[in-house]
Amino acid sequence: MDHTSTDRTPASTGARSFFKHPTFVLLLMVVLAAAGWYGNQLLVVLLPENNLPIQYFAVDKGGEWRYHYKHSVQQTPVDEYFRVNGVDDMTMTHTTYESLGVGLPYDPSEGKFTSLKKDGKFDLEMNRPYKSLKFRTAVQAMPKIIHKDQIYDLCPLFGQGTLVEVKAIKRYQYWLRTVFK
C-alpha cells in the first residue's frame, strides 16, 4: 500500500484541534489581561533632571497627595494639596499655611480664604489645574512630597538645586520611559 491510497479524511484520522494546548492559551490571555489592567493604573512620578532615579507612587483617580515645604521669606511651613484627575491632569485643591506675607496667597480672587483659628493656620481653596509641576529642591525649604503615610524627602533623594517635575502618567508610560531611556 502506498501513501496515495491512504484515507486522510477527518472521519478516518480524527479531528485535529487548532489549540493543542488550550490551558496555555487561556493562561496567556489571563496574563495579558492582568498586565493590561496593571499597566493602565495611574502613577504620580517625580522626574528629576540629570538622569537621577525616578520615584513614583500609585494613585487612584481622585487620589490626593501634598507638597510640603518651608516658605523662603516667612520661614513657616506650607502644604499644597493636589488631586489627580487623570493623565497630565492634576488640581491644586487648597493651600494651608501659618502666616500672611510676601508670596503667600490671600486675595479673595485667588480662592476661598479661611482662617483655621484652632490650628493657627490659614487655608485657601483654589482648584487650580496643572498638567505637571516643576520646582527646584532647596535644603532651606526642606521640600517633601507626601502620599498617605509615605514621605519623599526631596533633597536627600535628588540633592540640592535639582529640577524635579511631578506629573501623573499611566504605569505603562513609566515602563516605556524606563525601557527607552
Image (cartoon, grey):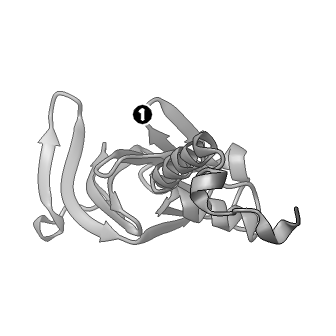
Vertical relation: 13 (above or below) 23: below
- Is residue 58 at all visible to an observer of this figure? yes
- Is residue 136 at all visible to an observer of this figure? no
In the rendered image, residue 127, in percent from the top left (x then y), is placed at: 21, 62
- In front: 16, or 1? 1
The residue at the far front in this view is 1
| In this rendering, position of residue 89 left or right of residue 166 | left
In the rendered image, residue 113, in percent from the top left (x then y), is placed at: 13, 54
**Amino acid type of disc 1?**
Lys
The residue at the far right in this view is 2
Measuring 55% from the left and 52% from the top, which residue is drawn there?
A: 32
Measuring 46% from the left and 51% from the top, which residue is drawn there?
A: 37
The quadrant in which residue 103 appears is: bottom left
| Total labels drawn | 1
- In front: 25, or 179? 25
Give the quarter of the figure containing the C terminus.
Answer: bottom right
Q: Secondary structure at mark 1?
A: loop
- In front: 8, or 169? 8
In the rendered image, residue 155, in percent from the top left (x then y), is placed at: 67, 48
Give the quarter of the figure containing the N terminus.
Answer: bottom right
Disc 1 residue crowd, few under 14, some 14–19, many 20+, Cα 10 Å: few
- In front: 170, or 150? 170
Measuring 41% from the left and 69% from the top, which residue is drawn there?
A: 88
The quadrant in which residue 148 appears is: top left
Measuring 31% from the left and 46% from the top, which residue is drawn there?
A: 97
In the rendered image, residue 18, in percent from the top left (x then y), is placed at: 60, 57
Q: Please give the residue where the numbered disc 1 appears in the rendered image.
A: 148
